[in-house]
Image: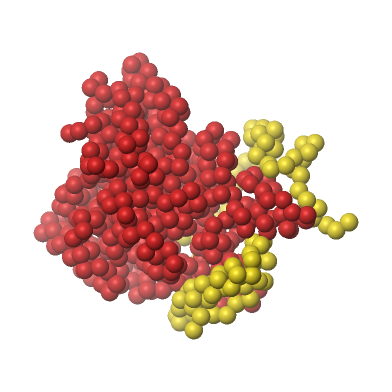
């Protein structure tokens, strides 16, 4: 073992409780790793040195007094910069919010704090979470810790890169069409999107409200479970928050997969998937079968329409949600002689090209004369996608596919062709449309030593089984995360 | 074939003040994306209800009680321009 920043939540927790390590030492190790790597990686938009040191000191004082808020006490965590943080600049990667300091915490952030976590800072993202490479951040891209010529994926690329680079022990992000799972896959960490409604969206700057969901990143499945346990639960401040018993996430982690029925989705695992990714995926499927799982092929026939469906629904919702960035109540303003001129200039100056593209696309899809043909039809196709999943889960417990058709691509490779960038999310989008949980677990590296992610999908509130299979995949694959020393060396 | 759209009208609806060159560029890109998105029209959906939300939810109700909220000065402090306790904007109506 190297430095404290190499620890998992679990191993750090043990060291903190045995007195081998203090929260302050753990934080300094993480901050030191950030200082070594940030100039190149740019995983963070803001590092809150003072706030983090205060929180670490409070955690040490609590340990000293024998107070224990649970497994996150004293653990340094990164927060995607589309979740508001009281007193700490929050931009969502957009110029329209540059300098914006929110007066309150998002519920997920407040829950992390009340669990004793140390918020290291705000991680980089594609502007308003729209993108698959973090190149759409208006503050400059994040680079992949495995190969800095390549993207970390997106939109939660900063969260994924910070965990991979050990400049955070764990992180949270948001996933609208794959924005947690795809960067997790490209950065060789675990990333998980919970069932829609399981984590409050209060204080998450909205992109597409019927799809957005906050979830955890970690270097192990166990760590993502620990973070999810802290942030899940009903919140009266989010009307779409699930008001029922939270699933038992951890119970079956060590049960293995004997007699678990696993369906391979041919539409998401065959054509268009890179050969290295496909081979690693198939090896893991064989290993699951060897461990006693019952493998079959289960089709999701409508999933080939999911990408088209998503690129109507998400922009439509975003065009409505982003109407609030008009220079009136908060954020930046460019003056004009009338209110309409002021708004037009503010939005022209404040919103980047991809956000502009999606706002225009959504505005068109919702406009009179086109609503039924585009948005209305996409909503009906969404029903078909959800029905496909429901039918599939009559015969299997979970579904699997690669997380991303390719490993990390080079910066600039897809920025000139929006459609090729959108294809990055082809495997992850169906779960968002259905509102169901899904996770990416790293299983191998390709010929260029770039990580490959394995996706597991489960029915709504099926997290117990999802984590059970994920844990088995993790153990079968034996993937080795980057050590702090290797990053930026 | 890429779909031809009245991009200037859409940009006006979206309140984004684009230059003539940007209108041409975004118009072309949107046409290509919409051509792909129009794939959803291939599926027969006559008797399929639309899904607007992944959970079968009805309204969430709570008691109508007075609770503390953010301080008025904090909220006004977020606005680009204020005057006498109001948010100030340029004229919305011609005088």
**Residue B15 place in picture, x, y as percent:** 67, 61
Q: Is residue A249 left or right of residue B3?
A: left
Pick the residue in front: A159 or A264.
Answer: A159
Assign the C terminus of chain A to one quadrant of the image. top left
Colour seen for chain B = yellow
- Residue that protrudes farthest toward the right in the picture: B95
The residue under the point 51% across, 66% down is: A313
Pick the residue in front: A209 or A186.
Answer: A186
- Residue that protrudes farthest toward the top in the picture: A65
**Residue A275 place in picture, x, y as percent:** 21, 68
**Residue A96 place in picture, x, y as percent:** 59, 49
Assign the N terminus of chain A to one quadrant of the image. top left
Q: Is residue B36 left or right of residue A35?
A: right
**Residue A156 place in picture, x, y as percent:** 40, 50
Task: Report whether residue A483 is seen.
Answer: yes
Q: Is residue A23 left or right of residue A209?
A: left
The residue under the point 25% across, 35% down is: A7
Task: Report whether residue A365 is seen.
Answer: no
Total residue callouts: 0
- Residue that protrudes farthest toward the left in the picture: A290
The residue under the point 54% across, 80% down is: B3
**Which chain does the red colour mark?**
A
Q: In this view, does B47 lie above or below B71?
A: below
- Identify the image quadrant of residue B24: bottom right
The residue under the point 56% across, 44% down is: A98
Q: Report the colour scheme.
A: by chain
Q: In this view, does A118 lie above or below A362?
A: above
Pick the residue in front: A321 or A238.
Answer: A321
Q: Is residue A213 above or below residue B49?
A: above
Q: Is residue A304 left or right of residue B85?
A: left
- Identify the image quadrant of residue A224: top left
């Amino acid at each position: 073992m190297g430095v404290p920043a190499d620890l998992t939540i679990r191993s750090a927790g043990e060291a903190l409780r045995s007195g081998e390590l203090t929260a302050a030492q753990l934080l300094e190790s993480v901050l030191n790793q950030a200082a070594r790597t940030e100039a190149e990686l740019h995983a963070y938009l803001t590092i809150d040195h003072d706030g983090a040191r205060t929180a670490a000191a409070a955690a040490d004082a609590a340990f000293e007094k024998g107070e224990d808020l649970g497994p996150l006490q004293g653990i340094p965590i990164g927060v995607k910069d589309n979740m508001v943080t009281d007193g700490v600049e929050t931009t969502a990667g957009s110029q329209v919010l540059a300098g914006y300091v929110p007066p309150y915490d998002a519920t997920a952030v407040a829950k992390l704090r009340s669990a004793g976590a140390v918020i290291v800072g705000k991680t980089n993202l594609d502007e308003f979470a729209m993108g698959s490479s973090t190149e759409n951040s208006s503050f400059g891209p994040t680079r992949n810790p495995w190969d800095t010529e390549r993207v970390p994926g997106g939109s939660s690329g900063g969260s994924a890169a910070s965990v991979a680079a050990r400049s955070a022990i764990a992180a949270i992000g948001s996933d609208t069409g794959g924005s947690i799972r795809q960067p997790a896959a490209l950065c060789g960490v675990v990333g998980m999107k919970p069932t829609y409604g399981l984590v409050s969206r209060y204080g998450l700057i909205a992109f597409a409200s019927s799809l957005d969901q906050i979830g955890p990143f970690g270097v192990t499945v166990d760590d993502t479970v620990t973070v999810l346990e802290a942030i899940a639960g009903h919140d009266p401040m989010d009307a779409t928050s699930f008001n029922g018993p939270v699933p038992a996430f951890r119970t079956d982690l060590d049960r293995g997969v004997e007699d678990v029925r696993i369906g391979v989705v041919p539409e998401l695992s065959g054509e268009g998937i890179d050969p290295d990714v496909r081979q690693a995926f198939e090896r893991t499927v064989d290993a699951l079968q060897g461990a006693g799982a019952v493998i079959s092929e289960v089709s999701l026939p409508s999933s080939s329409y999911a990408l088209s469906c998503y690129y109507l629904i998400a922009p439509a919702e975003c065009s409505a949600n982003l109407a609030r960035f008009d220079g009136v109540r908060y954020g930046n303003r460019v003056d004009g002689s009338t209110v309409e001129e002021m708004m037009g200039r503010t939005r022209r100056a404040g919103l980047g090209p991809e956000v502009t593209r999606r706002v225009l696309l959504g505005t068109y899809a919702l406009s009179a004369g086109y609503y039924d043909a585009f948005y209305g039809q996409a909503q009906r196709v969404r029903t078909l996608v959800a029905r496909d999943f429901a039918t599939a889960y009559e015969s299997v417990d979970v579904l699997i596919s690669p997380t991303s058709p390719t490993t990390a691509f080079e910066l600039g490779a897809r920025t000139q062709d929006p459609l090729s960038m959108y294809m990055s999310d082809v495997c992850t989008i169906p779960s968002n449309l259905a509102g169901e949980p899904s996770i990416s677990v790293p299983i191998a590296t390709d010929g260029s030593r770039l990580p490959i992610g394995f996706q597991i999908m489960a029915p709504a509130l099926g997290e117990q089984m999802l984590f059970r299979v994920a844990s088995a995949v993790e153990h079968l694959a034996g993937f080795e995360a980057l050590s702090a020393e290797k990053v930026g060396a | 074939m890429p779909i031809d759209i009245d991009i200037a009208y859409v940009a006006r609806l979206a309140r984004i003040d684009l230059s003539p060159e940007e209108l041409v560029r975004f118009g072309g890109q949107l046409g290509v994306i919409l051509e792909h998105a129009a794939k959803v029209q291939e599926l027969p959906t006559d008797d399929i209800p639309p899904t607007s939300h992944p959970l079968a939810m009805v309204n969430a109700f709570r008691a109508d009680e007075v609770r503390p909220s953010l301080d008025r000065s904090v909220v006004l402090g977020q606005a680009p321009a204020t005057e006498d306790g109001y948010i100030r904007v340029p004229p919305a109506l011609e005088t």
